[in-house]
């Protein structure tokens, strides 16, 4: 995902700088760094797939809802045209700053920033300690794959 000049500065830029300069302390097993990096890659791929689907929605020529009748004499359904227009606008439209495609792009950027932050911390840890560096490379190569962490979307008291 290419960034453009219009993107705002990273919300994690200060933390990444702190990590690069060795002023950030994180306590975490090296195994967690491997899984965090894998989870970030998984979510970035999922976001790109969602963006692809939104591009398809925006570019869908005919939906078959009655928005474009082919036979002469048939009347287009105004509500179908409105619905299709709204789907296109919500999926990927410069007219709608809150379209799904752009929202997903902002999520992608945040995940990239977290990944950069944790990679920076891990690189500082393993860059100083050769035993830790060797251990990390071994974990990265040999840890079994696992599904990404599942976040709770809704949280209710007592659950």
Image: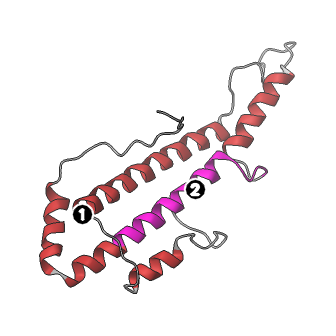
Q: Secondary structure at mark 1?
A: loop
Q: Is residue 111 magenta?
A: yes
Give the x, y percent position of residue 37. Answer: 33, 59
Q: Is residue 127 magenta?
A: no
Q: Is residue 32 above or below residue 127?
A: above
Does the CB distance between marks 1 and 2 fall below 8 Å? no
Q: Nearer the viewer, mark 1 or mark 2?
A: 1
Q: Nearer the viewer, residue 54 or 25?
A: 25
> How many numbered marks are there?
2
Q: Specify start and end residues of the magenta stretch as a single range.
A: 95-119
Cα separation, mark 1 vs mark 2, equals: 30 Å
Q: Is residue 36 above or below residue 82?
A: below
Q: Nearer the viewer, residue 126 or 27?
A: 27
Q: Main secondary structure of the magenta part?
A: helix
Left or right, residue 103 beside residue 73: left
Q: Nearer the viewer, residue 60 or 154?
A: 154
Residue annotated with mark 1:
29
Give the x, y percent position of residue 139. Answer: 16, 60
Q: In the rendering, which numbered label is found on residue 137?
A: none
Characterize the local packing of mark 2: few (<14), some (14-19) or many (20 or more) Cα atoms within 10 angstroms.
Answer: some
Give the x, y percent position of residue 136. Answer: 18, 67
Residue annotated with mark 2:
105
Give the x, y percent position of residue 48. Answer: 49, 49
Specify which label sits upstream in the sequence, 1 or 2: 1
Left or right, residue 64 beside residue 9: right
Q: What residue sits 32% from the left and 55% below the top? A: 38
Q: Secondary structure at mark 2?
A: helix
């Amino acid at each position: 995902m290419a960034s453009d000049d219009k993107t705002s500065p990273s919300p994690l830029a200060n933390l990444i700088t702190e990590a690069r300069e060795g002023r950030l302390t994180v306590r975490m097993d090296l195994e967690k760094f491997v899984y965090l990096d894998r989870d970030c890659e998984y979510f970035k791929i999922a976001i790109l797939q969602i963006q692809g689907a939104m591009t398809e929605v925006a570019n869908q020529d005919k939906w078959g809802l009655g928005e474009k009748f082919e036979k002469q004499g048939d009347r287009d359904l105004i509500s179908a045209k409105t619905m299709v227009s709204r789907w296109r606008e919500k999926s990927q439209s410069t007219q709608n700053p809150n379209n799904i495609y752009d929202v997903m792009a902002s999520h992608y950027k945040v995940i990239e920033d977290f990944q950069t932050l944790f990679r920076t911390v891990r690189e500082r840890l393993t860059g100083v300690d050769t035993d830790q560096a060797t251990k990390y490379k071994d974990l990265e190569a040999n840890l079994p794959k696992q599904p990404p962490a599942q976040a709770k979307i809704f949280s209710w008291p007592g659950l």
